[in-house]
Amino acid sequence: MSDEDGEEQQGLVEQLLDGLPLPAFTLDERDTVRAANVPALAILGERARGRNLALSLRGPELLDAVAGTRRDGAQRRILLRLPDDAQYRVKVTGLPAADPPQVICVMQDVTSEAQNEAIRREFVANVSHELRTPLTAMMGFIETLQSAAKDDPVARDRFLGIMSREAGRMNRLVRDLLHLSRVEAEERVRPRETIDLPGILRSAAASVRQVAEAHGSTIRFQGIEGRVTVPGDADQLTQVFLNLMENAVKYGARDRPVTVTISRETTSRGPVIRVDVADQGDGIDPIHLPRLTERFYRVDAHRSRAEGGTGLGLAIVKHIINRHRGWLRIESEKGRGSVFSVMLPET
Ligand code: ADP
């Protein structure tokens, strides 16, 4: 092939790569990048053309695949992990007829797929662990009741009491898991009803009254009086405020009230109704705040469990508020308490 033919052919290869939506580049027999489209240069760097691939990208597994394809002509697919945690599936195909012979690499970004998969795996591991803990305790007590404590009525009563608590814990966990999966599934469906927010807050407060009394706490309302309506799902919003009030009571200070304030606010996203649920507890270290609404994230797992928590309450809250196109703001100061603010668009 003449030099001119070779150049023409190289031009064609470049045009072909430019037409591809995925990052793609070719390498010659010495692993020099011959052609690369714009998405590929975004990964390899603007100066990658004409340089050895190893100078632009750290991927020994990719170079191995390229050498293999060059040797036997067979197509290869590999998973390439870059130091910034990005992941690509790369398809390596031989272009033996090109002059010089080249290998074309087409990359597909699978970073978010891989991240979703990691999140799913972690979730399954967490659920299994949360279920196994009470289950193991119950199995131990059943065994003891069948043997050593068989004829000891005092021990039997005590063990049955513990088993009942552990079964309750599993029951709450399963209930919250189902709830979470339902609210996640509905997250993109806008609520159609219009609800009276103070009514919802009162009904949530009534459900929390018993827990509040047990903690020597009360729930006080302040702010706008009378009807305040927003588009919303009554059951779900009741759940949001029930979770927030219950947390304020559980993690708040004994014998100190929880204050719920309703106000109107104009934000950059339009007019909202704002509900603040404030406690006077120990507060939360700022390092925890960004992760608080993650499933199973707890500041103090021991305390959460002792309070009968599942670690899913705030994750449920977040999804329900998202469905209402609203947002949650958490402000907390160590030693002074926390304020969980829910912003709900008025229309
Ligand atoms: P849990 O079932 O553990 O209460 P949540 O999802 O409702 O789960 O809350 C997650 C964690 O956030 C809790 O375990 C607790 O550490 C922290 N938290 C929630 N609300 C408060 C609050 N009002 N004050 C202090 N910490 C809180």
Image (spheres, grey):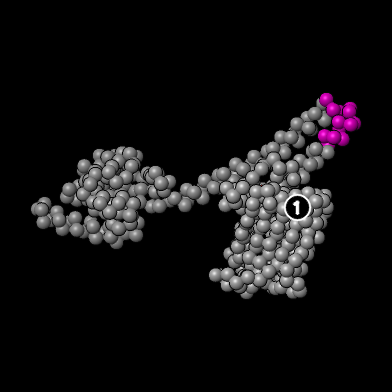
Taking the magenta stretch, the answer to whether it contains residue 347 is no
Quadrant placement of the C terminus: bottom right
Q: Nearer the viewer, residue 296 or 170?
A: 296
Q: Nearer the viewer, residue 242 or 102?
A: 242
Q: What residue is pinned by disc 1?
A: 249
Magenta residues span 148-160
- The residue sitting at 36% across, 48% down in the picture is 90
The furthest residue to the left: 2
In the image, is 314 to the left or to the right of 147?
Answer: left
Q: Main secondary structure of the magenta part?
A: helix
Type of residue at label 1?
Val
- Picture layout, residue 72 above or below residue 245: above
- Picture layout, residue 216 above or below residue 225: above
- The residue sitting at 90% across, 31% down in the picture is 153
- The residue sitting at 78% across, 59% down in the picture is 219
Q: Quadrant of residue 241?
A: bottom right
In the image, is 10 to the left or to the right of 172?
Answer: left
Q: Position of residue 166 (x, y in %)?
A: 76, 40
- The residue sitting at 66% across, 43% down in the picture is 300
The furthest residue to the front: 336
Few, some or many residues within 10 Å of mark 1 (<14, 14–19, 20+): many
Q: Position of residue 306 (x, y in %)?
A: 74, 42
- Picture layout, residue 25 above or below residue 343: above
Q: Position of residue 198 (x, y in %)?
A: 75, 68
